[in-house]
Amino acid sequence: MSEDKYFHGRIKVPYRHVAGAYAGRFIQEIGNNKRIMGVKCSKCGKVYVPPRMVCFECFEKMEEWVEVGKQGTVKGFTVVNYSTPVMPLKPPYAYGIIELDGSNTGFVHIIKEGDPKKLKVGMRVEAVFKSSPEGNILDIEYFKPI
Ligand SMILES: [Zn+2]
């Protein structure tokens, strides 16, 4: 096959999908009240952020909502050095797994630090909320080291 039969391009597709009751409330609390909510398992006590309907450990349905801290501890991260049109920030920045105070799970979000070499597992970070919420997970713009 010769190459002249193909047109190469790239598309950016707007989309929306149903967040579901738990993710919907989670996003609304962040945008409207600048609160980060988790759900607590009544059986094992584990607090999930982002909230899940069923505990992964004991398969219990979870219905108790609890507010967790805006600060947390970095459990792992990766630095983004290359840009694509869909990325929310200009590199370099990091995607991190953050265990928020009062939760027992890893919350994946952006960590912004001027010098990514200063990022460390175990460091403390704090949520920076967007001033004009848009109803998505980027209503927490990023986490900043504290
Ligand atoms: Zn449980």
Image: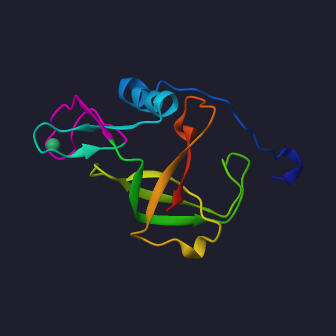
Query: Residue 53 at what x, y percent from top left?
Result: 27, 32
Q: Is residue 24 left or right of residue 1?
A: left
* 92 or 56, nearer to the observer: 92
Q: Main secondary structure of the magenta part?
A: loop
Q: Which region shows up in magenta?
A: 50-67
Query: Residue 49 at what x, y percent from top left?
Result: 34, 43
Q: Residue at x 86, y 45 (%)?
A: 5
Q: Is residue 44 left or right of residue 38?
A: left
Relative to residue 120, is residue 40 depicted above or below? above
* Displayed quadrant of residue 52: top left
* 3 or 18, nearer to the observer: 18
Q: Is residue 73 left or right of residue 8?
A: left
Q: Residue at x 39, y 56 (%)?
A: 72
* Displayed quadrant of residue 58: top left
Query: Residue 111 at what x, y percent from top left?
Result: 54, 58
Ligand 1 position by quadrant:
top left
